[in-house]
Amino acid sequence: MIQLPIYEEFAHWLDDILENNEMPEETKAFCFNLYEESDEEHICGVKIIAAGEYDPEDKDGEWACEEVWSSEENIFTVDTSDEEDTSWAHAQELIKEMIEEYLRNGKYSGILSGAGAVAIGFVDGELDIISQ
């Protein structure tokens, strides 16, 4: 279930990125890269990248390494310390839900859905395709 206050912060972060950065023409897909933001397991960083390649048959997600644009240091953080489950898998699920909601109702969702795919995953981990 979407937590409205954190979703509103996420949507504002993503609106700002998509409004103020022109995506390269060669963008084929987007990937929300997740990583542990600190030594504390319950803080997860999110960065969005545009990939110049996308292969739906590529189960390893190598296409996401073909980065043509990145939000770089503009990182969204999620703190799950007040959640019953503070695992990385739970953090990924919460962020996935926010991305799905943004794809349905976000101000600039057309930019994301206009690409071949939108995925999420921890850096060096498996990707979860949200839309294609």
Image: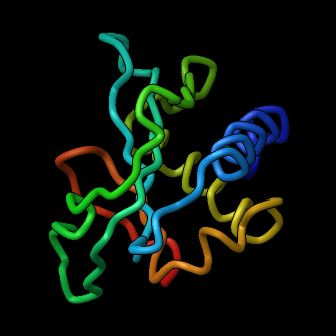
In the displayed structure, does residue 67 sit left or right of residue 3?
left
In this rendering, the answer to whether 97 lies above or below 92 is below
Of 56 and 2, the residue lying toward us: 56
In this picture the colour scheme is rainbow
In the displayed structure, does residue 38 sit left or right of residue 84?
left
Residue at 46% in and 73% down: 25
> Residue pushed farthest bottom?
57
Residue at 55% in and 56% down: 96
In this rendering, the answer to whether 93 lies above or below 71 is below
**Residue 23 on image: x %, y %:** 53, 61
**Residue 110 on image: x %, y %:** 71, 74
**Residue 13 on image: x %, y %:** 69, 37
**Residue 40 on image: x %, y %:** 37, 12
Residue at 40% in and 77% down: 28
- Residue 59 sits in quarter: bottom left
Of 113 and 119, the residue lying toward us: 113
Of 95 and 118, the residue lying toward us: 118
- Residue 89 sits in quarter: top left
In the displayed structure, does residue 29 sit left or right of residue 61?
right
> Residue pushed farthest top?
39
Residue at 60% in and 69% down: 112
Count of residue discs: 0
